[in-house]
Amino acid sequence: MLNAMKTILKTEKLSKYFHQPQTFQVLKELTFEVKEGEFLALIGKSGSGKSTLLYVLSTMDTDYEGALEIKGEKLTGKSQNELAAFRNEHIGFVFQFHYLLPEFSALQNVMLPALKLGRCTKEEIEAKAYNNLDLLGLKPQALKKASQLSGGQQQRVAIARALINDPAVIMGDEPTGNLDSKNTDVVFGIFKELAKERGQTIIAVTHDDDFAANCDRIIEMSDGALIR
Amino acid sequence: MISHTNQQIAWVHLTSRLRQTFVAILGVTFGISMYVFMNSFMTGVNDLQSDLVFTTISHVRIYNDVPRQKENILKKNFQEAKAIHIRNEKQILYQEGIKNANEITDFLEKQPEVIATTPQVNVSVSFRSGSNNINGILSGVEAEGEDRLFNMTNNMREGKWSQLKYQANGLIIGNVMAEEMNLKVGDNLTVQTFDGISRNYTIIGIFQTYTKTIDRTKAYLNIASVRQLISKNRGYATDIQVNIKNFDATSLFSNKLTALLPFQVEKWQAANEQLDAANTIRGILALAVSLTILIVAGFGIYNIMNMTVNEKIKEIAILKAMGFGGNDIVQIFLLQAIAIGFIGGLTGLLLGFGLANVIDQIPFKLASFNTLPMAYRAKDYLLGFAFGMLITGFAGYLPARKASKVDPVSIIRG
Ligand SMILES: Nc1ncnc2c1ncn2[C@@H]1O[C@H](COP(=O)(O)OP(=O)(O)OP(=O)(O)O)[C@@H](O)[C@H]1O
Ligand SMILES: [Mg+2]
């Protein structure tokens, strides 16, 4: 069963440098693979480079050395517009600090990536967005402006948004960082189900040991290098 | 193609900061209304000037003068200095005026540019009444033709212009002459030509053109009576006056006539260079002022859009992270600028029209006009709107392009 799994994400000697205030290597020749349907936890001390790695994997950060491949497609060297279209369709992202568009309602925030993709009708998208919000216990908040939601609610809206296009890879930078244990369990359950039932891949940065322990696999970083 | 989603986002941005949007729209409104108003006013002034001028002169005047500069035949034939004795020198009389005026007017009326023509016999005379004496011009005219070109019926203060046709000895004089010589309708006036011929006519009307020299020195008489006075045949005329459809194109037409007719052809610009220049300068002035205002409005939009982009830089980063491309971001912000330009443009046209209308009502006594001159030309409105859209589009594009270049990671990392 495990052998039949396809590789969904692959890196080859991924390195990244920051030059301010002085040059230092934040990612050190990272080479690893992630399988389809895998639920992966990325752990490590604060400042070890987890967020930086996730930005590179998400295709938003193109200032790196080495190679990145997702869904068998080589992404290194592609134009910004091509990458934008790729992330729109294949990558869902939950930021460390739950970024929503404050002037839009929770529902609109969730719908936007799907409207951009234009694969479904507006009605289908709306129904699906409601469904996602409902899964995360946010149905009563659907029509509230994002700026009127609490931190934990915003984070859950961001998760609902990351799921809307059924992306192949969902990346979360401490996606449950602001949630109580009950909601953490809900989110964990959703991720687990998505990985298992639909074969979507989850890569989640976490400081929560219990959360990590229940994942399929753990990758640990220290000073920009993989130690596990 | 403009995506519906981008439209929606642009709309939310616009409506979530109504005050700023309102200020930006107001800037465009003001700019465009000024553009429309300034141009309406300047065009009005130009039209008024032209109207005033063309009550007294036609677009093209055709006449036949003896060449003024007499050639020095001697010099032409004998280059070297020589002593020459000429006996019995004779002055040859050149034919002055146009003998077959009817043929010429018929020919002119066939030209596609021509609206109306009329022949005139203009004679320098002195007008005498008692001890008063004014030197001036006696103009022999065909009542109908003259009316068609110069709208004489409108210029009449007393009497009827059409009477000129029926009363062979009926004279119509200017109001200033009437005042100076203390004449009224029904009085007699003596006209003396420089050849010494004198005749009495009866005043049957008084006109006013508001051009003082004309109102003082000109009198109209039936063309046949003037021919009789100076013993000329039927068909004789000193001038043929021609009006054409587009008086801005007079040069072209007069050049054409010069080639076709053996007479002198004078376009109105030759007699009124200052009018032509003033029209052009006023046009430039109106354009400069209104464009300046529009550009200032453009800077306002540029500023506001720039501020918006800076304010929304986080949102831009999020949109990009979700997969919106650079083109989408340009669209989102350009749409906002265009919406501002469009709404501001329409309200600007309305305001400009209202302003022109109000100023148009203000009493202002000038010549035969009672209010400030104002023209309502579709061209001014269309151009104003087009300029407004162009400038807002440009002012919106620069910040929009800047927004599209935002690097999402640097913003999101915080
Ligand atoms: N823009 C930047 N310029 C220079 N150095 C940076 C920049 N962003 C991050 N760093 C540095 O890179 C290192 C890795 O940062 P990163 O945000 O990836 O850490 P992290 O593992 O996500 O930490 P945490 O668990 O606290 O979120 C840190 O030492 C940080 O100071
Ligand atoms: Mg981090």
Image (tube, rainbow, N blue to C red):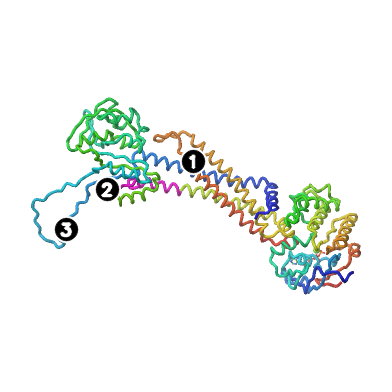
Label 2 resides on the chain identified as: B
Residue A66 in the image, given as x and y percentages of width and height: 75, 73
Percent coordinates x, y for residue B84 in the rendering: 10, 58
Q: Which of B116 and A58 lies nearest the eye of the viewer?
A: B116
Q: Quadrant of residue A161?
A: bottom right
Q: Amino acid at mark 3?
A: Lys
**Which numbered disc flags the more N-terminal residue, 2 or 3?**
3
- Residue linked to disc 1: B376
Q: Is residue A228 visible?
A: yes
Which amino acid does the dot numbered 1 rest on?
Tyr
Q: Magenta part mainly helix, strand or loop?
A: helix
B298 with respect to B279 (left or right): right
Task: Locate the C terminus of chain B and report the quarter of the image it occupies.
Answer: bottom right
* Magenta range: B262-284
Nearer the camera: disc 2 or disc 3? 2
Number of marks in the rendered image: 3
Residue named by callout 2: B263
Check disc 2 and give the amino acid type. Phe
The residues bearing labels 3 and 1 have C-alpha atoms spaced at a distance of: 60 Å
Helix, strand or loop at disc 3? helix
Does the closest atom of ligand 1 sit within 8 Å of the Cβ of label 3? no
Determine the CA span between mark 2 and mark 3. 27 Å
Q: Who is closer to the viewer here, B339 or A53?
A: B339
Q: Chain of mark 3?
A: B
Is residue B179 in view from this perspective?
no
Tell me the residue that label 3 is attached to: B75
* Image marks 2 and 3: residues in contact by CB distance under 8 Å: no
A189 drawn magenta: no
